[in-house]
Image (cartoon, rainbow, N blue to C red):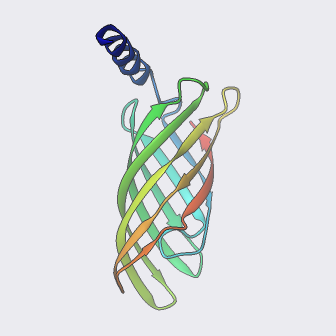
């Protein structure tokens, strides 16, 4: 049993040490629901190293919103060019004469097409509104398509 556990542990460590990043920077669009920090708009993701990225999202529906996220990326070893990620950050938005500030989380999957400079991702981005009123928005599923370079 100890040998099996050691073997599984070593395989797990090595599988997560594989290179997660397949591009350095990506810019594109994000489609999602219409809430203070999740509205459709533009996205830019930049890798700081192989597993850590920052993402900025600008929402442009009924006002403007900005969201900044720090993300951890890990490869899905069974599917080439696919990685899962999770992260956290903050947002500020101004919509319909109301200001919103809050915290956001994100978890999703990210696929980089190997032959073309295109990346797509689908994620869940819940948010906790702190200013205007305290509230939790859990319906933040989004889809992004980005040009990579």
12 and 27: which one is in front?
12
Q: Is residue 63 left or right of residue 92?
A: right
Which quadrant holds residue 101? bottom left
97 and 73: which one is in front?
73
Which quadrant holds residue 11? top left
Relative image position of residue 131 (x, y in whole percent): 32, 82
Q: Is residue 23 left or right of residue 146?
A: left
Relative image position of residue 72 (x, y in whole percent): 39, 40
Residue furthest out toward the right: 115
Residue furthest out toward the top: 3
What residue sits 58% from the left and 82% below the top?
62
Relative image position of residue 23 (x, y in whole percent): 52, 32
- Which quarter of the image is occupied by the C terminus? top right
Relative image position of residue 68 (x, y in whole percent): 39, 59
What residue sits 54% from the left and 64% below the top?
140
What residue sits 59% from the left and 65% below the top?
41
Residue furthest out toward the bottom: 97
Q: How many marks?
A: 0
131 and 97: which one is in front?
131
- Which quarter of the image is occupied by the N terminus? top left
Q: Is residue 138 left or right of residue 87?
A: right
Q: Is residue 133 left or right of residue 85?
A: left
Residue furthest out toward the front: 1
């Amino acid at each position: 049993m100890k040998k099996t556990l050691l073997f599984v542990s070593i395989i797990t460590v090595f599988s997560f040490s594989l290179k997660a990043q397949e591009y350095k920077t990506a810019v594109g669009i994000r489609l999602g629901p219409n809430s203070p920090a999740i509205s459709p708009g533009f996205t830019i993701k930049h890798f700081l190293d192989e597993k850590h990225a920052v993402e900025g999202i600008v929402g442009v529906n009924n006002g403007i919103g900005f969201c900044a996220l720090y993300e951890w990326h890990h490869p899905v070893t069974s599917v080439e060019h696919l990685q899962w990620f999770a992260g956290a950050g903050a947002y500020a938005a101004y919509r319909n004469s109301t200001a919103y500030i809050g915290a956001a989380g994100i978890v999703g999957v990210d696929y980089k097409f190997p032959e073309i400079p295109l990346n797509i991702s689908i994620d869940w981005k819940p948010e906790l509104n702190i200013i205007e009123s305290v509230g939790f928005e859990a319906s933040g599923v989004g889809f992004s398509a980005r040009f990579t370079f």
